[in-house]
Image (cartoon, rainbow, N blue to C red):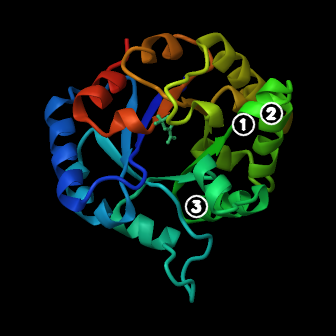
Amino acid sequence: MRTPLIAGNWKMYKTIGEATALVRDLLAGLGPLADREAIVCPPFTALAAVAPLVAGSQLGLGAQNLYPEAQGAFTGEVSPVMLADVGCRYVIVGHSERRQYFGESDAFVNRKLRTALAHGLRPIVCVGESKPQRDAGQAEPIVTAQVRAALVEVTPEQMADVVIAYEPIWAIGTGDTATPADAQAMHAAIRATLADLYGAEIAATVRIQYGGSVKPDNIDELMAQPDIDGALVGGASLQAASFLRIINYQ
Ligand code: PEP
């Protein structure tokens, strides 16, 4: 009942030429995707060049961030109206790099998420604990509190468009992946939180991705877990061969 979503977060990598070359290679290697969805999230500068290549294809388009206003005097920012206009369907909000390096609070992440929804974008909201938090046994309360904070004033109807990405911070870009069992336990805790907020029926429909050093050699085991509904992939989404293998998980 949940269509798994594999998303490539290219972060601050790829010029326009590199981005279009990668998308061409992905499209050339991608067969029909009957039971899963795949998207790429290039940097802002490459969105307009990538959009016509993926239009009508089996590859979707997302952005990595947005500013939570439709327009205005916000120098350097990009609005949800602009993202929809360029062809984005998804947008990542609350990535740990934004929380950590740009000081984004839970309240600001919630504002971004609600603004994305109001403009017809599907937010992929990232949550995750740090290593000291995990070592202190605080991973679950921290993550479930982030989920609750991100979803303040989000209606049950809107949850059809929300994707949650569980990304333990210590696993991002480190080569250290959560074990499938640890990831599954956290995904189950997140789903239980969603059930508490919206009821079991809606909770069962929300896609929860895992992110953190997802690679061709660990994707199959992660995707075999009952509550893991896709992956948010950084480093391994930057080369066609590795991202195609992840999209084609068994
Ligand atoms: C990410 O950027 O969301 C991520 C999970 O990165 P990586 O796959 O490189 O750990």
Q: Position of residue 192 (x, y in %)?
A: 80, 26
Left or right: residue 144 versus residue 114 is: right
Labelled pair 1, 2 in contact (Cβ < 8 Å)? yes
> Which amino acid type corresponds to the residue marked 1 in the rendered image?
Ser
Q: Label 3: how many residues lie within 10 Å, few (<14), some (14-19) or many (20+)? A: many
Distance CA(mark 2)–CA(mark 3): 29 Å
Image quarter in which the C terminus is found? top left
Residue drawn at (49%, 28%) of the image:
213
Distance CA(mark 3)–CA(mark 1): 26 Å
Between disc 2 and disc 3, the foreground one is 2
Could you tell me if residue 216 is visible in this image? yes
Tell me the element at label 3.
helix
Disc nearer the start of the sequence (3/1): 3
**Residue at mark 3:** 116
Q: How many marks?
A: 3
**Residue at mark 1:** 130
**The quadrant where residue 245 appears:** top left
Residue drawn at (58%, 12%) of the image:
225
